[in-house]
Amino acid sequence: MTHLSVSLGHRGISLGHRNDLEAEQWLRDVVLPLSLPDLAACTHLMREPYPHVALSFAGTGLDSATLPPVPPELRDAATAAAAEHATRRSGRAVYFAGVERLVGTITVGELLAWSAIDQVAVLGGAPAQPETRIQTRDFVRPQWRNGELVLTTQPARGGILVPFEMPDPTPCCADH
């Protein structure tokens, strides 16, 4: 059984995680303890053969011996996740160069200098200036768009920005 699907030096794994939270927990429990120095990891929403979250990886030291086998029905999803990451077309970055420094309140300039993030986008179209402060909430999840790793933010009180994706979102219709 194939453990990882490989595409252009990137690897994908699909184990049928139901959501990003579940996939990130698996990543923290299984992959991050390996302490791989140049690891980049993304989540990918997949539709086939059923809705689930796959993961993709870039970096050295991650091989099929360290990870569980991909079920046959999810191999295409694993391959697709690896290809999307390799071409930088899509993927929600969970672990990337500099992510450990993106805590508390920092400036846009610091975020760009300290991490692999290429661009900060602000909802509503206002440009993010280097001196603008970002309250990271210790949860930064940029996405690959057109070859660039882009963090989408939104304005918050006090003239600061916050990442658009919240660490603990309330599920839609949670009170129903």
Image (cartoon, rainbow, N blue to C red):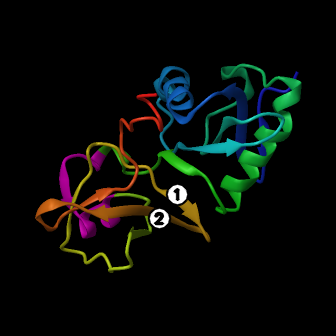
Name the residue located 53 percent from the left edge and 29 percent from the top edge: 27
Is residue 9 among what the camera can see? no
Q: Quadrant of residue 51?
A: top right
- The foreground one among 12 and 33 is 12
Measure the alpha-carbon separation of dots 1 and 2: 5 Å
Disc 1 is placed on an element classified as strand
Residue 69 x/y as whole percent: 77, 21
Residue 52 x/y as whole percent: 69, 34
Residue holding disc 1: 143
Location of residue 36 with respect to 94 vertically, above or below: above
Which residue of the protein is positioned furthest toward the left in this rendering?
158
Q: Quadrant of residue 119?
A: bottom left
Q: Is 93 placed left or right of 157 in the picture?
A: right
Location of residue 125 with respect to 113 vertically, above or below: below
- The foreground one among 113 and 54 is 54
Q: Is residue 42 magenta?
A: no
Q: Is 3 placed left or right of 25 in the picture?
A: right
Magenta region: which residues?
101-114
Q: Amino acid at mark 2?
A: Val
Disc 2 is placed on an element classified as strand
Q: Amino acid at mark 1?
A: Gln
Residue holding disc 2: 150
Residue 33 x/y as whole percent: 47, 23
Name the residue located 28 percent from the left edge and 42 percent from the top edge: 138
Q: Quadrant of residue 133?
A: bottom left
Count neighbours of disc 2 (C-alpha within 10 A) and say few if under 14, some if 14 to 19, many if 20 or more: many
The answer to whether the residues at label 1 and label 2 have Cβ atoms under 8 Å apart is yes
Count neighbours of disc 1 (C-alpha within 10 A) and say few if under 14, some if 14 to 19, many if 20 or more: many
